[in-house]
Image (cartoon, rainbow, N blue to C red):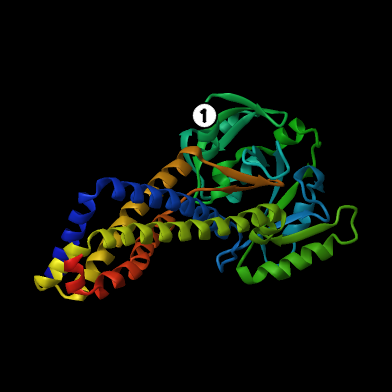
Amino acid sequence: MRAFINLLHLSWIQLVRHRVRSTLTILGVASGMFLFTSVETLQRSLAKATEATAADTTLVVYRQNRYCPSTSQLPEHYADEIRRIPGVCEVVPVQIVVNNCGASLDVITFRGVPEGLLRKFAPEIQILKGSEDDWKKRDDGALLGEIFAARRGLRSGDRFDAAGVTVTVSGIIRSPFAQDNNVAYVKLPFLQQASKTGLGIVTQFNVRVHTSSDLDPVAEAIDERFHSDQSPTDTRAEKAFFAETAAELIELIGFTRWLGFGAVLAVGALVANSLLLAVRGRIKENAILRTLGYPGKAIGTLVLSEGGLLGFAGGTIGVAFASGFLKWQSFTLGNEGQTLAIQPDFFVILTGIGAALTLGIFASLWPAWQAMSQPIVKNLRN
């Protein structure tokens, strides 16, 4: 163990001796890992929003053959009939208004919910600033997700207008669910009037069932009940609904995976090239180390350590900058009323740093082999 630590220290000395080359390599690795972390954050955010789990118990009831919220109109009285279906725990009528129904980086989404059902619709929300009481007192009050508020620079008491709806910020909320942090919650009657859809008409119903095994039977029962009505329904699990309506986003994000692969290849090639140059420039030094008793494995470990240090240093810088940038900008992708928050988490950070370290070591294998296999006598003569 002590011998390895000594080799690691010697690797660090070798890198410091060539500051310009090491700095440029680290910056190149950081640039590649910045891109890799951004892509992984997109992929991770998408997976959280679309992958079903055993804990999922929410259905979304939408108007059949309608996609944009403005085209989905359902009678509010459907809620009473849905509650009678076996397996249903709670039904919340929701009105959704967006400023842009297509794929966009800046989507403003209003969710109108009945005042008494807000906590049932989003029980996990926490009030960070302002108060829920103020929201209850004002007809035009809005509770903004913290990412939404940060992106728009809004605070409690501010007024703003979007999608033809003017509201007053009553509070800033936080939720473990990314979508809640990117929307504005308002009272249902207010949003119905402001959006001119009329009282008694909603965009969708969010239905909570007892267990995940009830999702499919309840969805079929709801659609069967309203199949012959004037407003037939299309009911799906919440994450399946997101995956369907945000198909354009999923296709776009799927393409970014190739960018991530490109970044990985660029990082590997950069580290390998830098170490090949280092090995060729240290032919006599390595021969002297071999003469002093350093075995070939030690020389190879020395080169591998340099690659690992370059990858770790560049990866840490790139991941840190990418995470800080994404948190600062609070990017949100939206499509057809569904929002996808692009926020890095601890798993993405660890993955990025681990990938950079692994790539640095892997890219050092060939330079390490060359350093190990060089003849001592020939190198000393050179």
Instruction: Please state, as top left, top right, bottom left or bottom right, where the N terminus lies in the image.
Output: bottom left
Residue in view at x 74 percent, y 50 percent: 204
Q: Residue at x 47, y 61 (%)?
A: 265
Residue situated in front as seen by the camera: 155 or 322: 322
Q: Residues within 10 Å of mark 1 (few under 14, many from 20)?
A: few
Where 272 sits versus 112, above or below? below
Q: Image quarter for residue 279?
A: bottom left
**Residue at far front of view:** 381
Q: Position of residue 29 (x, y in %)?
A: 39, 52
State the image coordinates of residue 312 (x, y, percent, origin top left): 32, 57
Whether residue 1 is visible to the viewer of this picture, yes or no, is no
As drawn, the residue found furthest toward the left would be 292
Nearest to the observer: residue 273 or residue 313: 273
Asked if residue 183 lies left or right of residue 287, the reply is: right
Place of residue 283 in the rendered image (x, y in percent of width and height, measured from the top left): 22, 64
Closer-to-camera residue (9/160): 9
The answer to which image quadrant residue 56 occupies is bottom right
The number of numbered discs placed on residues in the rendered structure image is: 1
Rendered position, 170 above or below 379 = above
Residue 201: name its quadrant: top right
- Lateral position of residue 335 relative to residue 261, left or right: right
Residue depicted at x 79% and y 49%: 77
Q: Element under label 1?
A: loop
Q: Nearer the viewer, residue 355 or 142?
A: 355
- Can residue 334 be seen here? yes
**Considering the image in quadrants, where does the C terminus appear?**
bottom left
Residue at 28% x, 58% y is 278
The residue to which callout 1 is attached is 153
Badge 1 amino acid: Gly
Tell me residue 217's x, y (percent).
72, 70
